Amino acid sequence: MSRAGGGDPHLIESFLDMMSAERGASINTIAAYRRDLLDFHAFLLRRSKDAKRAARDDVRQYLGGLSASGIAGSSQARRLSALRQFFGFLYSEGMRSDDPTVAVEAPKRGRVLPKTLSRQDMDLLSKAACKMDGDNGARLTCILELLYGSGLRVSELAALPLHAVRGREGVLLVKGKGGKERLVPLSPPARQAISDYLLTRDAFLPKGERRHHAERFLFPSRSAECHLTRRRLHQMLKSLALTAGLDPEKLSPHVLRHAFATHLVEGGADLRSVQAMLGHADIATTQIYTHVASDRLTATVNAAHPLAKRKTTS
């Protein structure tokens, strides 16, 4: 018997409730599914249809429209994945007798290499952060060392609890996607940055009732969440890039995570170790960094090796 009634928005919310309650989908995943499914709902409305009457051709036409609009193959594949799960839900709940996404081929994904930074860029950022005076300088240096030195996701860093760094010798306890915990080794500079920041951390604790809630976070703040927000972290890094003389568009928390992994692979680290430190469920996700390292080495050879510069003569 169906758990949902009403139009497509009601069906979508019922599906999202299931994803949250039964499959433990994160807030960000739920938000992405909602955007994708509502976009498909708007497409169906223009064709005077709804989810219960959508056909396989509707799904194909929708994906074709995304491709014609220049949307990346990876984004198209993500939307198809959302549709498959949604229609699978409708089928299992008896609201459809079939699944229109069956036999619909996923869009081809081009190999998009993640943006990263050179070691020289990282040196400039580190020096710029160290030159900053006072509490803000200590905090920013600590943030930089944890993002680049430990490869944390921005969501992991923002909500990192204080106990993750206290009482642990040289390692960081991180709770990643799906609530999975992992231990990430801390470099000596990262350990020193944490120690220096902890001496000034109280300066960032909010006053009043929020203080009690903020005390449990490594990076407390006056925000509604009582810790640094992802948006604020992005802003801080953009400002640091300007100070370091770098293009602020090149820098984000995720770019630092990519730089962490890329430089490890370039230095000879094995993929399984990098996978464990990044918290990737599938090593195929980690393998992209072998391509990044390979492409960077090829570019270096082409730019610097005398044979690469030799002009061919006919």
Image (cartoon, rainbow, N blue to C red):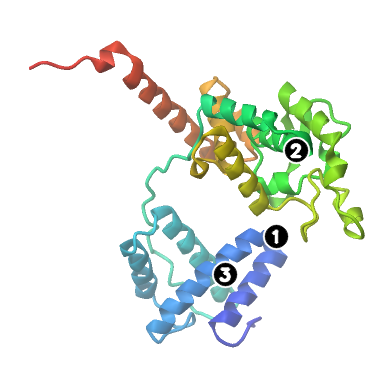
Q: What separation in Å lies between label 2 and label 3 (alpha carbons)?
A: 35 Å
Residue lying farthest to the top in this orientation: 306
Place residue 236 in its image quadrant. top right
Kindly state the secondary structure of the residue where label 3 is placed. Answer: helix
Q: How many marks?
A: 3
Asked whether 124 or 115 is in front, the reply is 124
> Could you tell me if residue 297 is visible in this image?
yes
Place residue 6 in its image quadrant. bottom right
Instruction: State left or right for residue 21 relative to residue 201.
Output: left
Which residue occupies 43% across, 66% down? 102
Asked whether 61 or 218 is in front, the reply is 218
Question: Could you say where residue 121 lies in the image, as x and y percent from the top left?
Answer: 53, 29
Amino acid on which the number 2 mark rests in the picture? Arg
Mark 2 Cα shell of 10 Å, populated few (<14), some (14-19), many (≥20): many
**Eyeballing the image, is 148 above or below 217?**
above
| Residue picked out by circle 1 | 24
| Residue picked out by circle 2 | 139
Amino acid on which the number 1 mark rests in the picture? Gly
Which residue occupies 63% across, 33% down? 148
Amino acid on which the number 3 mark rests in the picture? Arg
Q: Earlier in the sequence, mark 2 or mark 3?
A: 3
Question: Could you say where residue 39 lies in the image, as x and y percent from the top left?
Answer: 47, 72
Q: Which mark is residue 34?
A: 3
Kindly state the secondary structure of the residue where label 2 is placed. Answer: helix
Question: Could you say where residue 281 lies in the image, as x and y percent from the top left?
Answer: 61, 43
Asked whether 171 or 245 is in front, the reply is 245
Mark 3 Cα shell of 10 Å, populated few (<14), some (14-19), many (≥20): some
